[in-house]
Amino acid sequence: MIERRVLLPLALLLALAGEARAWPAEVMTGLGRDARRLLPRSLSRLLGEREPQIQDEMRRFPRELGLALATDLPTGRLSPETLEGLTAEADRVVELLRAGRVSEGLVRMGALLRVPADLSDPVLGVGPQGWPPGLTREYYALLGANLAKMPVVLESDRALHLARQDLPAYWQGLAERSRPQVSVIRAELYQNGRVVDHRRLDYRSPAWAVASLSYSRAVTGIAATWLALWREAHGDTTRMPAPRAVAPRPPPIADERPAQPPEAP
């Protein structure tokens, strides 16, 4: 009986961990490539050259950390033990880079994409009740079908200037901002006891907005994590691209002068 009581929770955690990399593979690839656009040109090139190795390294992400994230994300709070484990992974990257093992350090750093990506995905914030069957498929189909139309917005310019010691608090903030979006996804994609076909939703849907904002939050978080570690290792941070500020244009001022009657022929 004791053995069974231990194995059942473990099986549940393993199932949750299996869903932890819930972003579709093509979306994960897009996240990395869009995040590299926010990096110094030299770092972007170094990570881009190692994209296949980084993807392999992500598949070897420590299982215990995957379990910890799967357990914490539904609460919206990362436990001290989880943050300690994530910080240890980040510190290992800095150690490798400072020791001159640059290629190995870059691959390990690139694989940390997994952390802000998971923390930014509201699908992983669902509680023990889980999602109705088919709902996550439709949500990710909505994201994939419209990703080209969704602008990548820098969530915070300050995030690109974080120090390594700021990362735990920043990661915590990602989890906190993702958790409230769970209810939006459920309300929009599960109505009258049925899952809504993603093809019925467009840019006016709150679920569309959640998908777009979550993607941008993940891109910002990935770039912020990489830059903080690269800066800690004294990497080159020159030639940083400047994000383009976009503001809504004010409506044109109507001409209040009375219209003149047309001239008589």
Image: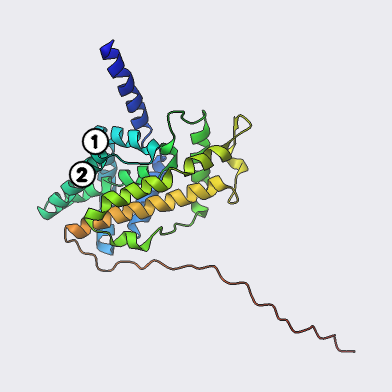
Give the total number of marks visible in the rendering: 2
Q: CA distance from mark 2 to mark 1?
A: 9 Å
Kindly identify which numbered label has been placed on residue 62.
1
Q: Quadrant of the C terminus?
A: bottom right
Q: Quadrant of the N terminus?
A: top left
Secondary structure under tag 2 reads helix
* Residue 28 x %, y %: 38, 45
Q: Residue furthest left?
A: 99
- The answer to whether one can see residue 70 in this image is yes
Q: What residue is at 49 percent from the left and 45 percent from the top?
A: 143
Q: Amino acid at mark 1?
A: Pro
Query: Are dots 2 and 1 in contact, CB under 8 Å?
Result: yes
- The answer to whether one can see residue 46 in this image is no
* Residue 16 x %, y %: 36, 30
* Residue 232 x %, y %: 18, 58
**Would you place residue 221 above or below residue 42 in this image?**
above
**Would you place residue 167 above or below residue 20 in this image?**
below
Q: Is residue 29 left or right of residue 236?
A: right
Q: Earlier in the sequence, mark 2 or mark 1?
A: 1
Q: Residues within 10 Å of mark 2 (few under 14, many from 20)?
A: some
Q: What residue is at 35 percent from the left and 59 percent from the top?
A: 37
Q: What residue is pinned by disc 2?
A: 89
